[in-house]
Amino acid sequence: MTDNNKITISAEGIKDGGMKSFKQDDDSIILITRDGDEFSAFDGKCPHAGADLGEGLRCGNRVICPWHHGTFHSTDGSLIEPVAMKGLTRYSVTRQGDHLIVDTTSNINERADNDQLADTHTIIVGGGGAGFMTANQLRHTGYGGKITLISADNKAPYNRPLLSKAFLAGQMDEGKLILGGSNWADRNNIDLRLNQRVSEILPNENAIIIENNNGDNEKQSADFLVVATGAEPKIPPFQGAELAGVYTLRSMDDAKAIKGATDNKNVVIVGTGFIGMEAAAALSQAGEAASITVVGRSARVMSNIVSEAVSNALIKLHEENGVRFVFGTGVESIDGDGSHVSGVTLSDGSTLTADVVVLGTGVAPRTEILNEVNDPDGVQVDEHLQLRDGVYALGDIAKATNQMGRMRIEHWRVALQHGMVTAGAILNDDNVNTLEERILFFWTAQYGKSLRYSGHAATPDKGILFGTPDDLDYIEYYFDDEGENTRASAASSLGRDKELIAFSELLRRGHAPTRAQINAGFDIIEQAHALSP
């Protein structure tokens, strides 16, 4: 019952070391966690996308969201792991016998005083997830110095993964994509400089060169320099790639242009990876294109990520929604009338009518302004993402060491993790988990279904499958070889959220199940609880 915003909840059934959520009549959710005789109360909706956290898993002091694995501390709600970008709102709770009284008007969150490194200046180059998260974490964990965030984009930092999902499908307005909400920079005393191009980075001087619109150069120095320039789409050397009507999808402007061009038009999408599949699903859901055809060299979609069985289920889902596939062939040329695209000639000699072509052909790291210090596949950095003293490289450009070894990863959560680690390094905060203590995780949303993936596997073709991908209900564990004692290095899932969370936690702790254990009926959720401190 409720009385003046005080909610009475039964403590029965909330186990020590456990959690439980309680849905309210106004659609709000209260999450209760218990540690011994101590109870904590929180807003039970994940601040990222509103998932019921009670449907997730608690492992030790980690409360893990079922949808996108945002992770929060069970006693104070602080953020441990993105893709959420802030911690949980915490409420006052008192115990009266067998009941708990939660006061939702009493927000007892504690924000750090911004009194650390007050006389320093941090320059962040890049307004994507990594740059945003660095600035946001610095301000929310005590940094009191000046922060300048420089972006070549004409918009404040926004949620890029949603461009090829809800935004392109017409299900989400532009304003909902802005990271941190409206006026984020002003509210956090951050000097946000848009439409600014950094032409050179001088890591030995902790300095950058900004090229102004009039061609003049401006040099700026900082105590801490964070380089998060991201990636840019690869455009294959197709004849006709420069024609009007040929698009890549990376920015808000790209997504707007594609949305505006597809009404009653024949769309050809080149590429069967994330961008290609998400764009196909989103445009199908938008319902405005006359036709959608996806072209891929492989006989599968997302072939480097999921098995043939899962790939076939995704193809079936798309075909049921009107998408056509042409497999086993590449693009010979993009054809047009000299100015605008009119079709695509494939390498097998066949042709497709096309008014719009979307190239989902991968991205490359934007490292050209760091040419002196990077290798061809990214910037080599240490465990703190540091390139030189006080100079950090993160996000899509960083070749950093994680649990799976040194690699460059182009995932949204990795970019956000990099921002958290970098902020912690600048503030010399030993409580922030290193990259080696974190797990790779990403997801793709297609037709309202979310396929989620944890870890990193050399191949998806040595797996163990449970469930039925055609019914969009499965979990599949991936191994790098056929050995019985080989531990799973990754897993993907649709609809089996708790199992995937449990796998992620075991993987994070170095206890991923072996092939023999899984074949023997290993209870992964029970084991995740048992091994949590």
Image (cartoon, rainbow, N blue to C red):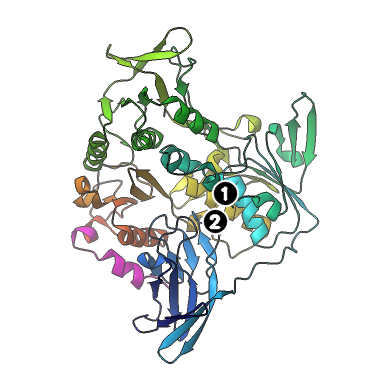
How far is disc 2 from disc 1 in space, using C-alphas?
9 Å
- Give the residue type at disc 2: Met
- What residue appears at the point 34 percent right and 32 percent down from the top-left corner? 272
- Considering only vertical position in the picture, is 9 above or below 107? below
> Can you give x and y, in whole percent of width and height, for residue 73 in the image?
50, 69
Residue 454 relative to residue 40: left or right: left
The answer to whether residue 185 is left or right of residue 463 is right
Residue type beneath disc 1: Leu
Position of the C terminus, as image quadrant, is bottom left
Q: Which mark is residue 85?
A: 2
Residue at 41%, 35% (x, y): give it.
275
Look at the image and tell me whether residue 409 can be seen. no
- Labels 2 and 1 touching (C-beta < 8 A): yes
Q: Is residue 186 visible?
A: yes
Q: Which residues are magenta?
A: 518-533
Position of residue 352 relative to residue 173, above or below, is: above
Mark 1 = which residue? Answer: 179
Along the horizontal axis of the image, is 262 left or right of 300? right
Between 400 and 157, the one lying in front of the other is 157
Report x, y in % for residue 337: 43, 7
Magenta stretch: includes residue 530: yes
